[in-house]
Amino acid sequence: MLDSIKIKLQYWLPKLALTRLAGWGADKEAGWLTQQVVKLFARYYRVDMQEAQNPDLTSYATFNEFFVRPLRDGARPVVSDANVLALPADGAISQLGLIRDDQIFQAKGHHYSLEALLAGNYQLADTFRNGLFATTYLAPRDYHRVHMPCDGVLREMIYVPGDLFSVNPLTAANVPNLFARNERVICVFDTAFGPMVQILVGATIVGSIENRMGRHRNPAARRHHQALDLPGGRRRRGGDAGKRRRDGPL
């Protein structure tokens, strides 16, 4: 019953307005109030600050500064074997497996199409038919930076407008086409393993992504796909590829 109510709220609540409001607050330097919010969040979600580069909760000027905190050196050793992919994010792999023709498994009873995930780019989708995929879920307590699983060269980056449903096991099991309907940034790489796509998906309250290519935010008027400017250059395995912020839309 409670889960049913939570899912209905996902459709009824003004997700964009809530995300903008949260972003406004998360970027504010509110002194003692920011410190209290950070402490409450860390306590409620049991954030392990001993892994952080800066474990002092009172030292973060804004909530977003805390939310995208870097880890201390050595906290996450990167695999050195060039034939092995590194885990790109500090979360749980919620799904992993084969792309069966054009279909990607979301949760029991739910699949979504590769072409829909890639914003209708059928030529790009053809490249990955019958390939492999992994979906990584970042919980609120996790380290919210994304890294490169291998060396690669960024070839294309595309902003895709969309909804802002929460992304968690409950919504994955109950919201059809969740990852293909939420706002996202698609990053296409050339690697020694072949072409690779890394997709950073927005969600309610977590709707802004900052990366080495610069932060990209979606003003309300921007409703269309947009190719984003590329800086070029190689990305190294384990290198910082992006941050998911408590913020407004992408």
Image (spheres, rainbow, N blue to C red):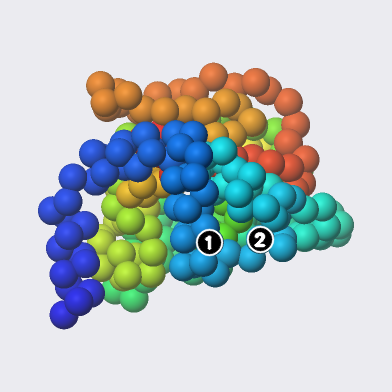
Of 154 and 55, nearer the camera is 55
Q: Work out whether 65 lies above or below 129.
A: above
Mark pair 1, 2: CA separation: 8 Å
Q: Amino acid at mark 2?
A: Met
Give the x, y percent position of residue 131.
Answer: 55, 57
Q: Is residue 93 visible?
A: no
Q: Which residue is mark 2?
A: 49
Along the polypeptide, which appears first: circle 1 or circle 2? Answer: 1
Number of numbered markers = 2
The reply to whether discs 1 and 2 touch (Cβ–Cβ < 8 Å) is: yes
Q: Work out whether 145 lies above or below 112.
A: above
Q: Amino acid at mark 1?
A: Ala
- Left or right: where 134 falls relative to 123: right
Of 149 and 49, nearer the camera is 49
Alpha-carbon neighbours of circle 1 within 10 Å: few (<14), some, or many (≥20)?
some
Residue at image point 25% right, 68% down: 174
Of 194 and 33, nearer the camera is 33
Quarter of the image with the N terminus is bottom left
Give the x, y percent position of residue 50.
Answer: 72, 63
Q: Residue furthest bottom?
A: 1
- Left or right: where 5 falls relative to 214: left
Residue at image point 21% right, 57% down: 10
- Left or right: where 79 falls relative to 200: right
Q: Which residue is mark 1?
A: 42
Of 117 and 213, nearer the camera is 213
Mark carried by residue 80: none
SS at mark 2? helix
Q: Is residue 7 visible?
A: yes
Residue at image point 42% right, 28% down: 217
Residue at image point 73% right, 42% down: 239
Give the x, y percent position of residue 235.
Answer: 73, 36
